[in-house]
Amino acid sequence: MAVPETYSALDLRGDFALSSPTIDIKAPIALPGDVHTALLAGNHIPDPYFGENEKTVMWVNETAWSVERQFTASAADIDGYLTLTLAEVDCIATILLNGEVVARTQNSFLRNDIDVTGKVREGNNTLRIEFDIAPDVAKARADRHPFPIPFTKNYQTNGLKGIHMNFIRKAACHAGWDWGICLMPIGVYGTMSLRKSRLARQDSVQVDQAHGSNSVELSIKTRLFAFAHGEVELEHTIDGQLITDKVVVQKGENLFTHNITIHNPRLWWPAGQGEQPLYELVTNLEGEKTVRQIGLRKLEWIVEPDEIDHSFKCRINGRDITMMGANWIPADAIPSRITPAVIRDLLESAKAANMNMLRIWGGGQYEPDYFYELCDELGILIWHDFMFACMSYPSDRPFLENVRQEITQQVRRLSHHASIALWCGDNEVIGSLNWYPETKADPGRYIANYDRLNSMLGNIVEDEDPVRRFWPSSPSLGYMDFSDGWHSDTRGDLHYWDVWHSAKPFEAYRTVHPRFASEFGFQSFTSMNVIETFAEAKDRNPSSPVMENHQRNAGGNARILETMTRYFRFPRDFEQMVFLSQIQQGLAIKTAIEYWRSTKPRCMGTLFWQINDIWPVASWSSLDYGGQWKLLQYMAKRFFLPVNVVAVPQHDEVPTNSRGTPVEGAPPTTIAFRGINDTAKPVSISLEVRAVRIGGGDRVVFSGNTAISPDAAITITALPFADLAEDEFLFFSWRDAQGKLLGENDYFPKPYKAYELVEPKVRAAWSDNDGEFVLTLTADKPALFVTATVDVPGYFSDNAVTLLPGRTTELTFTPRHGAKPSASELLHSLKVRNLSDTF
C-alpha cells in the first residue's frame, strides 16, 4: 500500500527588497544570495576584486541590512504543521513573519527549522530578515568575555583592523586571511521554504555500514521531528528493496532504525583505485521524499604502534591506500558565485590531476550538499575539519551549546556520504596557543579552555558517527596529546611550513619524513590573464600597491622573488616573472611530494596547500581563481601518478650548517631512482634514464626492467653523482609491459641558473584526433618547462614539459565550462613558452 502524501513545500526563494535603516539604498536582492551581489548589480559598489576596492567597499559589512518579500499561501499550503526552513542565514539576524519575531539566528552553519504553525495567513504574508552588524556583535562578545581570547593575525594583513571571528559562527576567512579578501558577506544561502507536515518532518537520515564477506548490512537511522503524539508512515527504498513502517512518534525528536542487507555489493573506491558505484536511497515520510546516493565501502584509519612510532594511514576495503591531494577553501569570497557548475569544474580538475583526497579546511565552511554528492560521484575522499582555525575559541556554556547543535546537525547531514573519510576537530588551534602573548602567558588556562571544546567535538562524533575516526586537530600527534605536532614526523599528521615561512631551500623537504603531510605549500603569482582582471598596466609590478593588496601574506611577494634568485636567473619582465613564479611553485611541491611518496609505507598521505583560490590573488593555490590550471596543477598530475618513478638524491652524510639546515646546493653522493606503485596489482615497467647535455646530445645511463609489488615503493637503481658532467641533467621515462609510455620525469643536480641555457626552436602543430584537439610539440634543443596556453577555457593533458630533440610530445586539450572551440580559435590564441624565454 502506498504511503499517503500529505507533505508539501512552498518555495520562498526569489526577489526580496534590500534596505538599510542607516543608508539611503534600496535595491532588489535575489535570495538565496548575498548583499554584495545585489549592490554590485545595482551599481552601488565597484568590483571588490579590482585594484584596492576592498577598502572602498568595507562599509558594506559595517552596515545593518534588511531583506523583505511578500508571498502568497493558499489554504492547502497551511493546512498542517508548518516549518520555515532557512538552511543558512549569514549570520546574526532576526526573522520576522507578518511582523512577529519568530527566530533569532547566530550561526551560519546551523540549518534553521522554525515552527511557524498558526503564524502564516491564507493570502498575502510578509517575510523579513534583519541582519545585525556582525563585526560589532563579535567585538561586544569579546569585550564581555572574562579573559582575553585574541583573534588570528591573519585578519591584520594589509592594515585591516581585524574582527573577533572566534566569537561568532561564520566562515572565519570571510574576515580575510593570508590569501583572502575581507568582505564579511551578508545573506541567506541554500534552502528557503515553508514546509507543511501532517504530523512530523524529516530532520536527518544516516546510514551505517557493516561489511561482511559478500554482503553489506545498512543501518538506516531516521530522525523525525514530531509536532505532536501520533502515528506516521515511513518508507525506505534501496537496491530494489522496500521497507514500509508505521511508527509511533512522540512530540519532539524521534529516532527510528531500519536494517537492509545488500548482497554481492558493488564496492566504492577512491579515484584511481576502482569504480564509484552509488546506490540510491529514497526516504519517504508521507510525501516528504529525500534522496541520498550511498557508496558501499569499508574505511578505517590505522593508527597503531609500528617500528617507527605510530602509523597514520587510510585503509579502504582492506587496502592501505596513499592519499594524494590538496587542501580546499571556499570557492569564492562572494557566496552567490558558488554554484554547482563552479564546484564541479574545480572537483573535476582535482580528479584529472590524480587526486583522491581533499581536506576541507577549518577556517572555511561546511559545503552545500551538492559538493559532497560530486565527491561521491568522482571518488574524492574528504578529510573534514570542523570550522575552527588558528585561534582559541570561547568555551562558556552558551557557546558550547550553540556549537553542539551545529556539529550534531552537520555530522547527521553528511555522514551518509562515502566521500567523508575523517572528522577533524580544527585547524592549528592547539598550535596557535604558542602564537599570541595572551595565550603564551597563561598556557594552563587556554589549554583547559581548548579541551572543553575539543572534547565535546570528539564526543559528538563518537555518539553520532561512531564508524568514523575523530582526529583532534590538524596537525596532531593523537588523542589528548597537546604537544607540538608541527615538527614531529614519527606519528600523526604534519604541517611543514619551513620552506615558505622560514625561507629554507626546497631541499629541506627531504629532511623531514612525515607519516601524513596534511599541509605544506609554496606561493606563486596568479596567472597573467587573471592579473589583467584586477590590475591596470601601470600596476603590474610586484611592489605596486595593487599587487601588494593582492598578496595577503606579509612579505610574500619578496619571498617569491628572493627564492627565484636562488634557483633561476632573474626574469626580464613582469610577465616572465609571473611565469617563472609558477614554475618555481611547482618545483617546490614536486620536491616534497616525490620524496615523501618515495618513503612509502612510512608516508601515506600528502595534501598540499591549496588547490583553489577564493579571489584573484598571489597564493599557494594550484588553480587560479576561476579554475584555470596553474603549472603546479600540471605538475601535480605527474607527481601524483599512481605508477611513478622519482629521483632521490642521497648523501653518505647530509651536510648541514651550524643551525642544522642542509647546506644549499651540496652535491649528493648518489641519485636513487625509486619506483612507486599505488595500485592493487603488481606492475612491470621498463625504465630508461638519459644524461642530457643542456646544449644538446644525450647518453643512456640506465635501461632495465623491474617489477613493483602492489602498494609498494622500491629502489630500481642508483647512479653515482660523479658520473654526471657539469652540463648534464637526467631525463627518464618508464613504460608498461606492452610498451605504453606511463610517465616522464627529470632531475637537475644544480640550480637552473647554473646552466647555460640555449634557445631552442619549439615547433607546435594542431591536429584533430577523433574529435579531440591534439597539440604536437618538438624541439631542436633541450627545452625546459615548455608550456602551452590558449585563450579558450580548458587544460592540456600535460604542460611545463621537458622536450628533447628527436622526441615528440603530444598534448590533448580538454575544454572547460562547456566551451566548444574551433581549430582556428586554438591556433590563433596559442602561446608556447619555455624557461629560456624568461631572461
Image (spheres, rainbow, N blue to C red):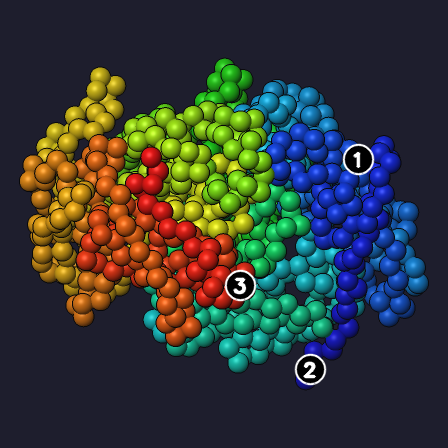
Q: Looking at the image, which residue is at 67% across and 50% down?
A: 336
Name the amino acid, label 1.
Ala
Residue 768 visible in the displayed image:
yes
Residue 119 visible in the displayed image:
no
Element assignment for label 2: loop
* Position of residue 127 measured from the top left corner of the image (x, y, whole percent): 85, 51
Q: Nearer the viewer, residue 86 or 625?
A: 625
Compare marks 2 and 1 and give the one earlier in the sequence.
2
The Cα–Cα distance between marks 3 and 1, rounded to whole angstroms, is 41 Å
Contact, CB < 8 Å: mark 2 with mark 3?
Answer: no
| Label 1: how many Cα within 10 Å (few below 14, some 14–19, many 20+) | some
* Position of residue 186 measured from the top left corner of the image (x, y, whole percent): 71, 41
* Position of residue 46 measured from the top left corner of the image (x, y, whole percent): 70, 38
- Quadrant assignment for the N terminus: bottom right
- Quadrant assignment for the C terminus: top left
The Cα–Cα distance between marks 2 and 3, rounded to whole angstroms, is 45 Å
5 lies left or right of 361? right
Judged by depth in the image, the label closer to the viewer, 3 or 1, is: 3
Q: Nearer the viewer, residue 206 or 350?
A: 350
Q: Looking at the image, which residue is at 89% across and 67% down?
A: 74
Q: Which residue is mark 2?
A: 2
Compare marks 3 and 1 and give the one earlier in the sequence.
1
| Label 3: how many Cα within 10 Å (few below 14, some 14–19, many 20+) | few
Element assignment for label 1: loop
Using the image, determine if residue 831 lies above or below residue 104: below
**Quadrant assignment, res 494:** top left
Tag shown at residue 64: 1
Name the amino acid, label 3.
Ala
444 lies left or right of 798? right
Contact, CB < 8 Å: mark 2 with mark 1?
Answer: no
Q: Looking at the image, which residue is at 18% across and 70% down?
A: 738
